[in-house]
Image (cartoon, rainbow, N blue to C red):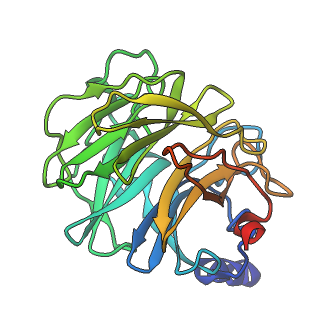
Amino acid sequence: MKKHLAITAFLLTSTSLLAANPLFPEVRTADPAALVVGDTVYLYAGQDEAKDNKTFFVMNQWLGFSSKDLKTWQRHGPLLKAKDFSWAKGDAWASQVIEKEGKFYWYVTVRHASINGFAIGVAVGDSPLGPFKDARGSALITNDMTTDTEIDWDDIDPSVFIDDDGQAYLFWGNTKPRYAKLKASMTELDGPIQKLDLPNFTEAIWVHKKADMYYLSYASGFPEKIVYATSKSISGPWQYRGILNEVAGNSPTNHQAIIEFKGKDYFFYHTGAAQPDGGEFRRSVAVEPLYYNPDGSIKRIIMTSEGLDAVQ
């Protein structure tokens, strides 16, 4: 027991000194979301706690990491749990944190306790590391708000983008992609839920902007590849541009985050290739450099074991 407690304490405060993939070999992580605040990258990920790759996802909480150089990472322990939302039953699936006016809003996927299916909630904190608390006391999106699918997991994978004019948008979905405006409070919808026209859409939307171009990347097909589309407007129409990265290791799911940090661009994703026990339900976050072509298209991501060490 003492040995177990000592190992647990180490993991909660450990620092990774390696830039190789996966980034955090001591813990299984999935669905990365990255946020740049000043000279620091904050990385948020769900924790895969399944004991093997034969059953299903076991995910109860989200972990936090930070780095000033993408090589040395500080682990901050669990920052939020599914059951921190009193109305949630569990299942800490994909999420994203975004900053607005000094507040940090954490949009999460959880299973609703009383309304059938998955739901999207939002927590808020005063710093990138929290503490975070439920900002509403209820779900922002529930399964009964999107009744045009027969599945109960169509309201997952929230991604929030704040445009240059300050207007915030929530994107999400599985099998059918959706988006809606958010009110200034960041905790309420501001208008109807809109549908998106994206080919072969599965899940995992991530929206970012580079120069005057909007980029919407998402997981396509199954096993999933990450593809992307571009637009001159956040409301579309979106032009499909092709594949960003192929099936990640032996994980049929794929989930990405794209950021610019200190003048360079990066692509975070998860893979099931970690040894000795990686796989479909035991994934690990990795990172690669991302490069744009002169015409605004993005070069294909090359997944490596060396990670950022491969380009140093």
- Residue at 25%, 42% in the rendered image: 140
Left or right: residue 205 compared with residue 16:
left
Q: Which residue corresponds to the image point at 63% horizontal and 81% vertical from the top-left? A: 72
Q: Residue furthest right?
A: 276
Say above or below: 306 vs 167. Answer: below
Compared to residue 233, the image places residue 285 above or below, namely: below
The answer to whether residue 168 is seen in the rendering is: yes
x then y, percent, for residue 155:
39, 33
Residue at horizontal 74 percent and vertical 48 percent from the top: 272
64 or 266, nearer to the observer? 266
Q: Position of residue 12 (x, y in %)?
A: 59, 78
Residue 165 x, y percent position in the rendering: 17, 53
- Image quarter of residue 28: bottom right
Please state if 297 lies on the left or on the right of 215 as rendered: right
Place residue 215 in its image quadrant.
top left
66 over 302 or under it: above or below:
below
Camera-nearest residue between 68 and 89: 68
Asked if one can make out residue 33 in the rendered structure from this viewpoint, the answer is: no
